[in-house]
Amino acid sequence: MAYLIVDEWLWEDLSRHKGTEKGKEAFQFLRAISQNSDVIVAVKGSKFLKKALDLCNRPDREAKELMSFFMSQFFFNSDNLLQVEQSQLPDLPKQFEATVKDDDHYLVQSYFLVEAEVLITTDSDLKDALVAEGLNCEWRDYYLPIYIQKYLHDDEP
Amino acid sequence: MLNKISVKNFRSIRSADLELAPITVFYGPTASGKSSLLYAPLVLRNFVTNPGQSVNAFFNLGFMDLGGFEACIFDHSISKSIEISLSGEIKGEKLFYGVSFSKDSAVITAGLGDFRMKGEVPLPYPLNQTFAFEFSEGEEEYTVNWTGLASTVIPKQASDISQQKAQSLAARLNQTSELLNSLDIAPHRRGFFKPQYTTTTLSTLPTSEDEVASIIINNQYLAARISHYARKICDRDFRAQNVPGTQQFKFQTTDINSGIPVDVVNDGYGINQVMYLWAKILRTEVRTELIEEPESHLHPSIVRNFAHNLSVLVEEKDQEKQVMLATHSADFVASLLVAVSEGILPSSHIRCYLSEKSGSATTFQPQKVNDDGQIEGGLTAFVESQMQDLKSLFGIS
């Protein structure tokens, strides 16, 4: 079991704002996490969950089904999602104060809280700042196909 | 409160030993055995209420006749026996009562703490047998004479004090029937379908609209208590009013936003359901309410309020209420989980079971709830259909 830190690209992709292929890959990624019993870390009140709420508020059936899937399979599932209160987060190490945007601090803080396996992002500034300090941060486009290939068994429901 | 149920060879349940909580939730596919789990304690209750019936009569629940012993025994194998037992606690006393039903006899077991009594009786059982047991507490010794339902206690050394203690012991032992008699069910078929009601005689398990109406009419506080919860759940005031010059009563709801009163039969069907269900739940004599699909006919926002208020109710110390429910609603379960995350319902006060069929037998998989209101394995049982839709949406075969 590994802790994965994911930022808001997940919601953009699931919404198919960046095309159906990205949407499909994000959905397969979630299924692979579920099958591999890995854990997404979600900080309450964070930008990540606020974006999820935006999708929740969309009136179309597709968004409802996506959110129903995410809530049932992840948000209410102690096997696949760790809910973290802001108060549980450790202080941000000083070396990240200048290089990581304020509203991304929670990603770095949660990385340290759970000793995460990886932080997956589409933000090049964030990636550069983390990699420079020796953290394991991967591009979304690089990491997802490898993870899906390794862990998704499509014969399972 | 009941804290354990064991069922063997009843309908699709080959064997189930389940821990219970103030709120116990069963979910899973249609026809996976959820309702059977709710009906089993009612069979036991029927036996305690009137053991002098044929074995088939115990399987007639009033609102539904399950078709007798042979229809209900697992795999229709009549050489087996149907075993149903409940453990629970009343006023700090640990109680146990169980019956193993065969075609023409029953083995009854009852207990108080570690003390157990067991006896076999013919069916129908006209309560004409007595089983004697030795019981000691401290230095006092007693003989317990037990009919299978009720106990009388005789001290070995007669004195005023030992007689008093013997009476007290008998009262404690006889609480087992209280454990069962405080069970009630709100079945699928429910609601108020008439504009007016008169009081009627109650059966041992009152579920008809006339009976539930009588319960409301005969309890001067019940309508107000239903109203208290109805306001929070669906913005309705609820009143039972006597029709002047008659013995008849009408039930009215008032939308607290518009102020317009209507007979409950003319309000929405979901509102009607809420009133019926809360009359059953709040009934004074009831400690444990069994509910089939509380979400039926309710909008998700009302489902949420219902689950939230149920969580509040079971935590009210003076109420001593417990609920066991079978549901197909992810919203209902999610709302209970949110109540846990909000600290309204302690995680130890809810137990969730995923009911599934394995071959012809039902299994109940416990799913632990944590303090964040998350559940082991998630609510995957509810999203199988969405999963198919989403796969299709993303072009996944």
Image: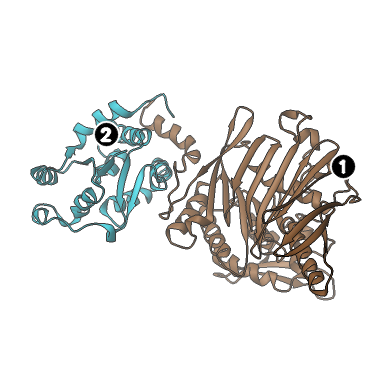
Chain colours: A cyan, B brown
Q: Residue at x 25, y 44 (%)?
A: A5
Specify whether A53 is left or right of B369: left
Residue B317, compared with residue A16, is above or below; it is below
Q: Does the rendering let one see residue B321?
A: yes
Mark 2, secondary structure of its residue = helix
Chain on which label 1 sits: B
Do the residues marked 2 and 1 share a common chain?
Answer: no
Q: Which residue is mark 1?
A: B123
Q: Residue at x 67, y 54 (%)?
A: B114
Query: Of the residues shown, which amino acid type is indicated by label 2?
Result: Lys
Q: Residue at x 65, y 59 (%)?
A: B89
Front residue of B231/B204: it is: B204
Q: Residue at x 40, y 34 (%)?
A: B390
Q: CA distance from mark 2 to mark 1?
A: 68 Å
Residue B22, image x and y in percent? Answer: 58, 57
Chain on which label 2 sits: A
- Total numbered labels: 2
Q: Which residue is mark 2?
A: A22
Q: Report crowding for label 1: few under 14, some 14 to 19, many 20 or more residues within 10 A (C-alpha).
A: some
